[in-house]
Image: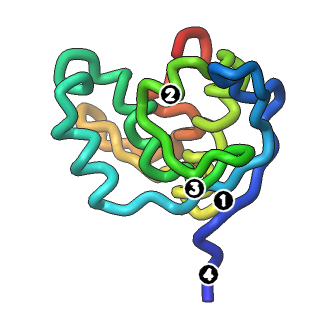
Amino acid sequence: MSQTVFEFRLPKGLLDEQGSVHRQGKIRLATARDELLAAKHQRVRDNPAYGTLVRLSQTLLQLGDRTSFKPEDLEHLFTIDLAYLCQLYNQINQKGHAHADVQCPHCQNSFEVDLSNSGESLATP
């Protein structure tokens, strides 16, 4: 049976309202339903980049002693932690590798594309 839940440790950690830092966590593989829910989310319609937080909030199973997340909760992640989670999400949902064979629609040449941060900006959450 293939692995569907992955443990991780954030570089900095999520700082909650009480001042506690949450670093140890678990994330599960994404499903088609996760993608559909993200696409329907109003904030994603207004700002497609917000889909990252919606998808992460759905697939995060645990972070410290927390087991439930809203996208708004993840707005408080440090940038390095968001980048880490995006990289992890992409890696586990692409079977450990982040490459795809594609074909240019103009010249029909085939080549491999690195998808490790596809659609994600490491500079801004």
Quarter occupied by residue 97: bottom right
Residue type at mark 4: give it. Answer: Ser
Q: Position of residue 52 (x, y in %)?
A: 43, 32
Q: Secondary structure at mark 2?
A: helix
Residue that mark 3 sits on: 61
Q: Position of residue 55 (x, y in %)?
A: 41, 42
Question: Mark 2 or mark 3: which comes first in sequence?
Answer: 3
Pair 4/2: label in front: 2
35 in relation to 49, above or below: below
At x 58%, y 18%, the residue is 76
Residue type at mark 3: give it. Answer: Leu
* Cα distance in 3D space between marks 4 and 2: 30 Å
Q: Secondary structure at mark 4?
A: loop
Q: Position of residue 102 (x, y in %)?
A: 40, 47
Residue that mark 1 sits on: 96
Label 3 CA crowd tier, 10 Å (few <14, some 14–19, many 20+): some
At x 83%, y 29%, the residue is 11
Residue that mark 2 sits on: 73
Foreground of the two, 29 or 114: 29
Q: Position of residue 8 (x, y in %)?
A: 77, 49
Q: Secondary structure at mark 1?
A: loop
Quarter occupied by residue 39: top left
Q: Secondary structure at mark 3?
A: strand
82 in relation to 37, above or below: above
Foreground of the two, 1 or 112: 1
* Cα distance in 3D space between marks 1 and 4: 12 Å
Residue that mark 4 sits on: 2
Pair 1/3: label in front: 3
At x 63%, y 20%, the residue is 17
* Cα distance in 3D space between marks 4 and 3: 18 Å
Residues at discs 1 and 4 in contact (Cβ within 8 Å): no
Question: Mark 1 or mark 4: which comes first in sequence?
Answer: 4
